[in-house]
Image (cartoon, rainbow, N blue to C red):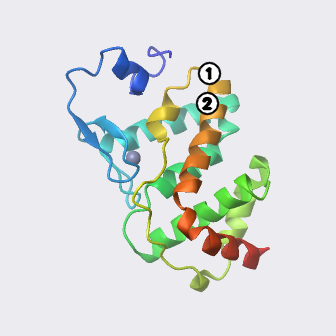
Amino acid sequence: MNVGKWPGVIGRREKKGGHMRNARLTRCAGCGAEVPEESGPTHRYLESAPACWRIYTELLARDYTDPAYYEHHRLCVDAYAVQHPGRPSPQTLQSAAVHLVRLYMILEGGLPLAQANDFMKRFAERDKQSMHWLEPPQRRGELTVVDVAVAGDAAEHATLAWKWAASAWNAWSPHHPQIRQWAFAYL
Ligand SMILES: [Zn+2]
């Protein structure tokens, strides 16, 4: 990977290279990724380790500056949100619900990524009373933002983003019937 361009991204390849040998690691309470222990900001309700949030914001910055990466931006946003569902509240339950429904629509319903934003806006405006808190799975997916952040180019980023999204969606399999029901009620 080009560490000169993305010096903050710390992924497994760097660890294998020995750069992380002396770093203290911690497990992200959201996605379970092993990340460097550091202080820093996190999202208001998508609870995570500071390093996990930092790696994600660096990933988003790359999405916004390179159209080739931006193509798969929504997959990353959905995957990250459902791997960091936070604690029960009206805001978090709606966030998890809309991101899970969108993952369903993209991965199983064939919703084109280009239409994913419009879908999200319309879906989020519907009657929110029908949504409720889904107890998050203990394991949130084999892949995390750390695995995707190490992509060396846009093609690899795309491949990893799809795998990340599928892995996050599959982790919520006990709730798939409810998520599909919410999607069908909308359609
Ligand atoms: Zn995390």
**Contact between labelled residues 2 and 1, with CB atoms less than 8 Å apart:** yes
The residue that mark 1 highlights is 153
**Residue 40 seen by the camera:** no
Residue 65 relative to residue 80: left or right:
right
Q: Amino acid at mark 1?
A: Asp
Q: Is 25 located above or below residue 8 in the figure?
A: below
The residue that mark 2 highlights is 157
Residue 84 relative to residue 185: left or right:
left
Q: Name the spot of residue 172 as percent of width and height, x first.
A: 53, 61
Q: Is disc 1 placed on a helix, strand or loop?
A: loop
Residue toward you, 49 or 170: 170
Residue 30 relative to residue 104: left or right:
left
Could you say which disc has been placed on residue 71 in the image?
none
Q: Is disc 2 placed on a helix, strand or loop?
A: helix
Image quadrant in which you'd find residue 187 = bottom right
Q: Name the spot of residue 57 as percent of width and height, x first.
A: 46, 40
Q: Name the spot of residue 48 as percent of width and height, x first.
A: 35, 51
Q: Name the spot of residue 31 as percent of width and height, x first.
A: 41, 49
Q: Is 34 located above or below residue 126 in the figure?
A: above
Beta carbon of the mark 2 residue lies under 8 A of ligand 1 = no
